[in-house]
Amino acid sequence: MTPGRSVENALLAGPLVLFLLAVLGFPTVLSLVYGFSETGFQTLTAPEFSGLKNFRDVTADPTFWQAAWFSLRFGAITALLQCGLGLALAVYLAPLARAHGWTVAILIIPMIVAPAMMGLMYRLVLHEFAGPVPHYLYSWFGWSPSFLGPANVFKTVVVAETLQWTPFAFLLFLTAYQSIPQDLREAAAVDGTRPWRLFWKIELPLMMPTVFVALFIRFIDGFRVFDNIYTLVGAGPGGSTTSISIYIYETFLRRGEIGKALAAAILLFATAFVLLSVAQRLLRGRAP
Amino acid sequence: MTFRTCLRAGAAALALVASGAANAEVTVLGWPGGPEEAALRAVTELYNARADLAEENKVELLFTSRDGFFDKLQVDLAAGSTAFDINLIATYSIGRYAPFMDPVTLSDQAGAVFGDTVLKTMQFDGQQYGVPTDLSLHFLYYRTDLIDALLADDAAKAKYSEIAMKHLGKAMEPKAPADWTWEDFVANALYFTQSINPESPTRYGTVIQAKNLLFNMMVFHSWPRSYGGNWMADTGAITVDSEAFRTALSQAKMLFDLGATPPDSTSYEYAEANAAYASGQVAAMVQWNAAAGELTAAQAATGTTAPPAGPDGRFTHIHGLGLGLNKAAENKDGAIAFLQWLSTEEAALAYAKAGGAPGLASETAAKLAADRPDLVQVGEYASTYGFVMNGGTSENALSVYEAQAKEFTGYWAGTQDLDTALKNTAAAMTDLLK
């Protein structure tokens, strides 16, 4: 690269680098500083270095582990459900989508709704006295399930998340499914391969990189869930629906333990980073 | 430039971004939406019309969204924002905001206008941090048609006694709600629950808003307080793990276990609980006074009285919204003058007439009897039954409510036992109120 070209590159990239430093760099540095400091709202401008104390406090807090377990379960279950359903829908509806492309637009509508709005919507829809679902269940069957009661709340938030984000997995799988060369299918048909075997032995293996990507994206998204659960049921009785993100929010703003909250956020970031690195490595290993 | 200077610069920049309409002579950050905003606008107009008011001391109002209002306010105050001279405060957050605010001296009329109990809702460490503008407390709402029918029917009374004997171990008689103890409240709730009494006209006897939310603990507090419960003794010792809290928590738990409150009510807050009552499927509930209009409109046969009594008497949690002085205010003199005027009878009456809900002493409230009869009841209950828990205005009061909400709702939902809930609450409160 010539010196002139190098200067040109630096000039062109400079504004973007400065923008990223301002938008991402400053909060990141601030989070790191506060994460290793004794900081509350009264000492916001004068944090005192406290080493690893915040990290020790976080890891010694049973609520943090309760939240981590909730996030892990929620992320894993919703990712599996969304990808399972998304894959089934993609394969089943592929002919329809090919013939009438507009049907895909209808199927992905739930993704357009903001998660916080989705939470509020379910809060209304599932309310025992104001919501249509419990109303008709009670009117028709004399049955009034408490969707948001302690026994069902986890299942309810899992179903709500699955209904909203299955279209995302569906879209990824549909694209992957439709990009499988048609001549492979034709060759298999000539050899007398049955449809089920065609799917298991040819189509699914070719879609596996997409399956892994979808699983990881959905897991990370589920693991860091905040808005729809927070607007639907909050932290839950006894903290039963407290995800890691809700834990961080409540520790930061409700309890004013800024250092501890940011230490938890750093741990969350580190976990996500490790998981993504593993995912990337796995994907590279599986690349044809 | 040191790192600390960088932080200050960052905080100042944030404050500048958040400032919006920060060019007024005296800027008041008020509680947005609802009657509070309408009332504040009315009194501001009245104040600004005063002939002797200098142009630079006129008041301008600033409103943000209610969502996360107190969280945003906390960040603004901590950053030393000069975007407003006067800001909203609430009883439970005074201690948290006090380091960023200045105490105020109210007008000579304040004591007579509001009374000591109400003024206390704006005090921290013995100093007055704000003018009380709106007072919140609790009423017992009940269906008069159902209670009247119960009291007039001997067979129903016998059934009531039978249910009370079975679940409470006493053959209790139904009473008028004004005479209820908490045991009567529980017995009534059980009687009006269809899963216990299939002949009940309502599906549930009561609705307890038990979402893991700090405001729901305020509604619950009148219950243990009537059994002598408090957060801490005068010595500073935490007293939450007491017989009073055990009794109140256990009684409420019985209502959850027996289905006398909707199973979903562990996810209910104000709006959901009101919707349950408004549906006609709930016989009685303890709720904020602000719900009176909504509940009465939905169920015309609704009566209100003070929350039930316990061995120590009848109590209602009270807290107030008010306006106080930002330490970083740029026009402190103008702000103090407005706050002092706001604590006069003229301002309080105007505020009430415009839809606000100030807690007024009986003599002042009597002047509004024709326009706002509800304020007479609010004022009477506040001065007679009102209480603020020891430590209820401390720096970490909000966090104490949060800790209680988490532990108590966990107990009600069955995720932990009573001993664990109280042990965890006491440990958290010891840490927060030390």
Image (spheres, rainbow, N blue to C red):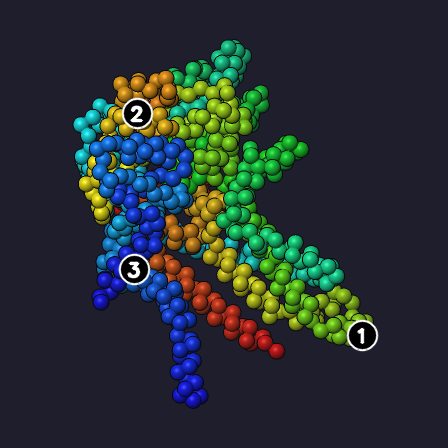
Q: Position of residue A18 (x, y in %)?
A: 37, 70
Residue at x-position 41% and y-position 34%: B34
The picture quadrant where one finds residue B360 is top left
Label 2: element kind:
helix
Q: Are marks 1 and 2 on the same chain?
A: no
Q: Is residue B251 visible?
A: no
At horizontal 56% and vertical 67% (from top left) the residue drawn is A213
For mark 3, does the 10 Å Cα neighbourhood hold few (<14), some (14 to 19), or many (20 or more) residues?
some
Q: CA distance from mark 1 to mark 3?
A: 69 Å
Q: Quadrant of residue A187?
A: bottom right
| Near-viewer residue (B423 or B98) | B98
**Amino acid carrying mark 3 in the image:** Gly
**Residue B10, disc:** 3
Q: Is residue B316 left or right of residue B188?
A: left
> Relative to the observer, which residue lies in front, B51 or A222?
B51
Say which chain tag 1 marks.
Answer: A
The residue indicated by pointer 1 is: A191
Q: Secondary structure at mark 3?
A: helix
Q: Nearest the camera: B169 or A3?
A: A3
